[in-house]
Amino acid sequence: MALPGTRLVVHTGTRPALGAFVWMDITSNMIGILAALLTTVANVPQVIKCVRTGESADLSLKMLITLALGLLLWLSYGVMRGDFIIAAANGTSLCLVGLLLSFKWRDRNSQAAQTDDPQHLRR
């Protein structure tokens, strides 16, 4: 019996089987894991290059800072939502970008020490 002013709607279609929900959950987790792996591994070649060459001049400081802030926000989001995949991937990526930032900082400081030009410190 429906309440006054409402309609009673009867669903005559079939409901998805529980297996369909399990499959979608597994599939979405696999997609999340693959996406997390690829975006995290994308930073590794640049870190390897900086370690081997000791150079970071071709890296954009603004891009690295922006990326680090975005990763920090994603990490916070993953922790707040209790999503291990998001938190772990972005935490790992943040560490790799932090390493690149440390190379950039080291190079800027070593270049500043080699020059007497005070304008160099403002770049």
Image (tube, rainbow, N blue to C red):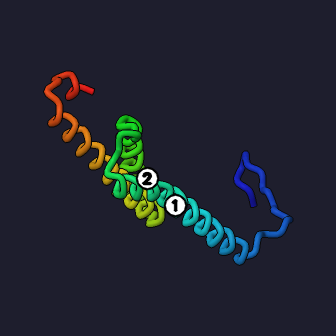
Question: Residue pushed farthest right?
Answer: 12
Quarter of the image for residue 112 reads: top left
**In the image, residue 38 lies at what x, y percent?**
54, 60
Comparing labels 1 and 2, the label whose residue is closer to the camera = 2
**Label located before the other in sequence (1 or 2):** 1
Of residues 81 and 107, the one drawn nearer to the viewer in this rendering: 107
Amino acid at circle 1: Ala
The relative height of residue 6 versus residue 80 in the rendered view (above or below) is above
Q: Residue at x 76, y 70 (%)?
A: 16
Is any atom of residue 94 visible in this view?
Answer: no
Query: Helix, strand or loop at disc 1?
Result: helix
**In the image, residue 9 lies at what x, y percent?**
79, 57
The relative height of residue 30 versus residue 35 in the rendered view (above or below) is below
Is any atom of residue 27 visible in this view?
Answer: yes
Of residues 13 and 79, the one drawn nearer to the viewer in this rendering: 79
**In the image, residue 58 lies at what x, y percent?**
41, 40
Q: Residue at x 36, y 49 (%)?
A: 72
Q: Which mark is residue 80?
A: none
Q: Which residue is mark 1?
A: 36
Whether residue 2 sits left or right of residue 113 in the image: it is right
Measured Cα–Cα span from mark 1 to mark 2: 17 Å
Query: Helix, strand or loop at disc 2?
Result: helix
Assign the N terminus to one quadrant of the image.
bottom right
Whether residue 65 sits left or right of residue 44 in the image: it is left
